[in-house]
Image (cartoon, rainbow, N blue to C red):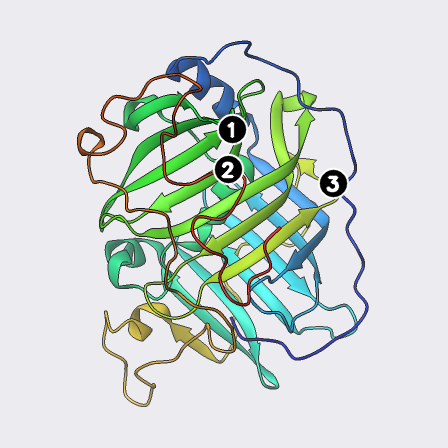
Amino acid sequence: MIAISVSGCVRQVAVVDVPPPPALFETTPDIVALAAAVNRTDAIRELSTNSASVDVLSMTAVPKLTANMHLQRDRNFRLKASIPIIMGSGIDLGSNADEFWFEVPEGMTQTLYHANHQQYAAHLDRAILPVDPSWMIDAIGLARLDPDTVLAGPVTRTDGMIEVRNAVSTPAGTYQRVCFIEPTAGYITHLFLYSPRGRLVAKSHATAHQYYESVNSVLPHRVKMELFPSSGPPLAMQLDVASYSVNQLLSGDPQLFAMPATRNRVDLLQMSGIVSSPPGMPASRNPVSGMTGSSSSLAGGPVSGTAGSSAWSQPVTTSAGVPTAYTASGPTGPPLRGIRYE
């Protein structure tokens, strides 16, 4: 993303206080019951809002942007954020069954960065971005928990949250994902994703959860997401949503999930040196320039490739002890320069 050096008034999105989601558990559930609670969001096939805001936390010069977001399971996603007084200038993040993209302003024009899902996943260890941006679908509250992939847990943490570690198989290797789950209502609050080498590559923190009775599901209305590229500064943004339309898209655009036909475009695989650039195309461009921060000291200790060689070798459900090196109440590791933490 490129820093936008503009300012202006932006509609504020208020997250309304609502009753807490109904309780499901009085004691720590087993993994089957916990997965059933988390996976209630399978009933949500479409999610849409025209009343959101985006705060690009890693770009302190950028004001809050008004936004709309629409998604269809499994990979259709569109988030467009801009400043109302500057039409056509802003951020466009999208994904469909074949490809994903993000479009950002560069000077007086827009530049579109894009890649094919399958090709990008096969080279994720060498890619510019550490995750496919469709990961945002998980981060905003639709992550699933598959008991067959669980390496360890559920474990009750000292802060009362339930923690589960599971394997995520990709063409680039096996990643590990750590979930923090609210202990009584059974919804995910935190996600941490670690590469096959044990490096933290993405995390999210969801709050302001609301219960949607029509689909018996809980959704967050405030989500902070952070990505940690292998080189360059971290990326961080916060999404606030005033209201959702569930299983109905608030858009009649037949091209809603089509990649824009932006003339100035860059293939992310070419940027990573994975495929050769055609004649006349620059060999490398950096879509995360203009940001402040440091990519060092990103995480609390590395995650072992197997549960048996880590602190998870004998997980127990107890309030005693600390099962992991990170906590639910703060970032993993020291705050990064230029990022505003809650």
Residue 78 — which label?
none
Name the foreground residue: 5 vs 83: 5
Which residue does the numbered mark 3 point to in the structure image? Answer: 243
Secondary element type, mark 1: loop
**Quarter of the view holding residue 306:** top left
Task: List x then y, in percent, for residue 305.
Answer: 20, 40
* Label 1 sits on residue: 159
Residue 87 at x, y = what percent? 73, 73
Reply above or below: 178 against 338. Answer: above
- The kind of residue on which mark 1 rests is Asp
Alpha carbons under labels 2 and 3: distance apart: 26 Å
Q: Nearer the viewer, mark 2 or mark 3?
A: 2
Instruction: Give the residue displayed 48% in from the left and 69% down from the top.
Output: 293
Q: Residue at x 61, y 28 (%)?
A: 218
Q: Secondary structure at mark 2?
A: loop
Image x and y of residue 175, in percent: 28, 43
Tag 2 residue: 328
Residue 200 can be seen in this image: yes
Vertical arrangement, residue 151 with respect to residue 56, above or below: above
